[in-house]
Image: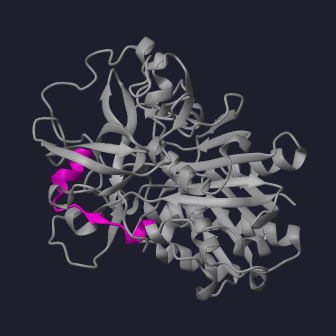
Amino acid sequence: MTGIAAYGAYVPFTRLPLALIAGGPVVDGGPEKAVAYTDEDSVTMAVAAAVDCLTGFDRAEVDGVLFASTTYPLREKQGAALIAKALDLRRDVNTTDFSGSLRAGTAALEAASNAVAAGSARQVLVIASDCRMGTPRSALESKLGDGAAAFLVSDAHPVATIEASYAVTDELQDLWRTDGEAFTHSWEDRFVVSEGYTPNLVEAVQGLFRKTGRGASDYSRAALYAPDARSLGGVARQLGLAPEQLQDGFFGTMGNTGTAFAPMLLVAALEQAQPGDRLLVASYGDGAQALSLEVTEHIEKLGPRRGVANHLARRRPLGNYDAYLRSRRLDPKEWSENADLGLSATIRFRERDADIGFIGARCSSCGLVHFPKPRVCYRCHTKDEWEPFRLSDRTGRVLAFTFDYFFPAAEPPTIVVMTEIEGCRVQVQLANAKPDQVKLDMPVEFEFRKIHDAGGKANYFWKAVPILEEA
C-alpha cells in the first residue's frame, strides 16, 4: 500500500505577539503567531522541514521532490530544484512546483501517492511551505503564520496509508494576491466563511464519506483547514465531528500557514496517532480537498522527529513591532535593495555545491575534511584527490565568535562564529540566538537560510543554530 513513510515539519523560532500588532502591551502566554525571520522564507523553511522528514532515511533513494507554495519568490525558476540541491539529492531526481492555490499542499501529496502507486517513482518527497503577509496591523496579519510540512511518500513500510481522496472545485474571490504584490487580500469575513469555506469543506468531506462508505465516527482525528476556531467549530458540527476528534488548529500559537496549514495539522495528528487510527485531512482554496488515511503498525518504528510539537515549544518572542517590520523589509528606506544585479550567475553556478548543498571535500589519502574544497590537502599535501562530504546534516561547535553591529540586521548585532565540523573549520553566521547566549564550545547544527537579497532575488547559504534540548 502507498502512503506516508515519514513526516517532518518546521515552525520558525520567532514569534510575533498579536498584542504588538494592535499596539497594546504584551502579556506572557498571550496569543502569538510564528513568523519567518529576516533570513527565512518559504524555501528555507521547506529545507528545514525536509531535513526533519528525512531523518534516518537514505537521501539517495528519493526519486522526486514536489514543492507546494504560494509564496516562492521567483516566478520563472523552480523552487523544487533549489530545495533538491540544498538537500544534496541525486542529480536525476524529478522536481516539480505546485502553486496557485492553498490546496497545493494536499494536491502535491495526492500526486506523489499516485506516482508511487503507478510505479513511476519509489519515494517522493512532498513539501508544503508558505510565508504569507497581511497588510501591517490588519486583521488578516494577525491570522497568518509561517511554517512548512514535509512527507516522504513510499510503498515501503508506510506509517499511514492514503486510502482515498475527494475534491471539489469552486471559483470564488475570497483570498487572492496578484503577481508582484506583497500582501494577501481578503473579502469580507462573513462572505468568505459562509459562501466559500464552509460549503466547500463540508461538500468535500461528505463526498469522501460517500466514496469510502465511512462517517465521522470512523475517524480518530480530523485535521481540517480553518480560517479561525469559530469557523472550524461550525464545519465540525455540520459533519458530525466531536470536539475531541478535532486536531488543534494552533490559532494564537502558530497561525494559518496557508498551503502548509492542512499538511502541518496532519503532521501534528501523526505525532499522536496509534496503529489502526483513521485520520481525516481537508484543505481549502478554490474549492476543497479531503483525504482519508489509516495509520499502520510502522508508526511505532519511525524514529523521533521534531515535528510540530517540538518546534512550537522552541520560541523567541519579538519585543517590538518595528523589529518585525524590519525583518520583512516593510520599514521605509531611502534606497532600493534591488538596485544592482547581485551576485554573478557564473559564480553562483560554479560554487552551487558548496553554497547551496554545503558540500565540503574529504581528502582521499588522509581523510581530512575541508571547506571549501582546495586543490591541495592541508595535512598530507595530496593534490586533487577528493570525495564529496556533506556538512549540512552534521553538528559542530563554536570555536570563536564576534558581534557585527554594522552589517544590516533587523535586530543588531549580526553574530558571526567560527565553527568546527568533523575537524573542519567553517565561518558562518549564527541564528536563533542573542549575544548573551553565545558561548565557546556551544554545540550547533546547521539550517538553510537567506544571507541577503540582491539583484531582486534571495541569496542563500547555511547558518549555525544552537542545539536546544528536545521539548
User: Do we see residue 104 in this rendering?
Assistant: no
Q: Nearer the viewer, residue 140 or 358?
A: 358
> Which residue is at the far front?
380
How far from the left and from the top, in percent, is residue 289?
70, 58
Left or right side of 366 for 342 = left
Give the quadrant of residue 385: top right
Q: Please say which color scheme the image uses.
A: one colour
User: Can you tell which quarter of the image residue 317 is in?
Assistant: bottom left
Q: Quadrant of the C terminus?
A: bottom left
324 part of magenta stretch:
yes
State left or right for residue 330 relative to residue 353.
left
Count how many numbered circles sit on residues in the image: 0
Q: Position of residue 89 (x, y in %)?
A: 63, 37
Image location (x, y in percent) of residue 467: 37, 60
**With respect to residue 310, does 187 lie above or below?**
above
Residue at position x 35%, y 18% in the image: 343
Residue 8 percent location from the top left of the image? 57, 59
For the point 66% across and 42% down, the residue is: 66
Give the vertical position of 313 relative to 68 (above or below).
below
Q: Nearer the viewer, residue 285 or 469?
A: 469
At 36% from the left and 54% from the top, the residue drawn is 444
Q: In terms of depth relative to the viewer, which is nearer, 448 or 279?
A: 448
Q: Observer-nearest residue: 329 or 226? A: 329
The magenta stretch spans residue 199? no
**Residue under the image location 62 percent in, 51 percent down:** 105
Q: Furthest residue to the left? A: 405
**Magenta-tinted stretch:** 311-327
The answer to whether residue 191 shows anywhere in this view is: yes
Q: Is residue 445 above or below residue 427?
A: below
For the N terminus, the quadrant is bottom right
